[in-house]
Amino acid sequence: MDSSPDFAQYGFPYPSNLIQAFIGGSQLHGAKVDQTDDTDWYGVFIEPPEKIIGFDRDEFFVFTTGGKEGGNGPQDVDVCLYSLRKWAGMAAKGNPSALHFVFAKEKFSTRWWATIQENRRVFAARIHLNPFIKFADDQMDRLMGRKGQKNIHRAELEQAHGYDTKYAMHVIRLYLEGKEYIQTGEITLPNPRVELLVDIRKGKYKLPEIEEMGNELQNEAYAAQEKSPLPESVDLEAVSKLITGVYLDFWEAGQK
């Protein structure tokens, strides 16, 4: 396990309160290609008591060295950190990105995050398939030009392949993750179908084939939902008890 990342250099105000961090994006899913992607850091921190009890809230921190025209390059760094309470609320609602946190291989972790990991099943629920499918469907509509605007930052991919192949890769990844999650309550990272994802990113599939693949995976996921071993919904009382215990233990440890 690596030492705690130096997020203070980017202006993060609570570096000693970080309890977990990992590298996300394409690297998390095993689909990074030819050193073309930036580095995406994600993590969880525990804010000071006054940021919970008092009037002020400080629930997330974001930073990027990129944001320039043409998109981020391999030299850029994105940082996205959530307070434990904020992250837990997202995970309890089935947010796919939030659920990644308990399945990712950490670059940094603590005993407080280990407690969350050991109890990660309290966040699992059958209804969580819906956010996966809704998010994937929304991205598929954007990819197919039926909704919103395409990602203009990767115009070179559209010129080479006729569509944004990296965007398409993440659409199919979401369908795959939703299907696995509803079947097992787990998300395997890197993705077991990484060869398929890389092939999609390299433009080996035509756009209509991507849509057909997505439709098939969606149908398979809904069929699996009927036999899912997961509880119907999340026990919010159990989640609240879990994170309250972690907060109190962290604050108490800081006073010793």
Image: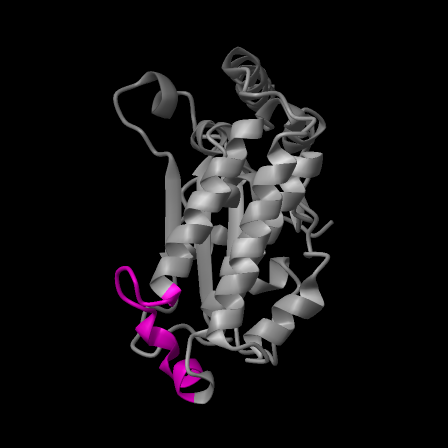
- Please identify the quarter of the rendering in which residue 234 is found: top right
Residue 52, x across and y down, in percent: 37, 21
Q: Where is residue 181 in the image (x, y as percent from the top left)?
A: 64, 40
* Residue 6, position as x, y percentages in the image: 53, 54
The reply to whether residue 38 is visible in this rendering is: no
Q: What residue is shown at x 57% (from left), y 23% (from top)?
A: 250
Quarter of the figure that contains the C terminus = top right
252 and 81: which is toward the camera: 81
Total labels: the figure holds 0
State whether residue 167 is above or below residue 74: above
In the rendered image, which quarter is residue 192 located in? bottom right
| Magenta segment boundaries in residue numbering | 143-159
* Camera-side residue of 227 and 131: 227
Q: Does the magenta stretch include residue 90?
A: no
Residue drawn at 58 percent across, 55 percent down: 216
Can residue 2 be seen here? The reply is yes
Residue in the image at 70% along x and 69% along y: 195
Relative vertical location of residue 178 with respect to residue 173 in this rendering, above or below: above
Residue farthest along the bottom direction in this orientation: 160
| Image height of 238 relative to 144, above or below | above
Residue 145 lies in the magenta-colored region: yes
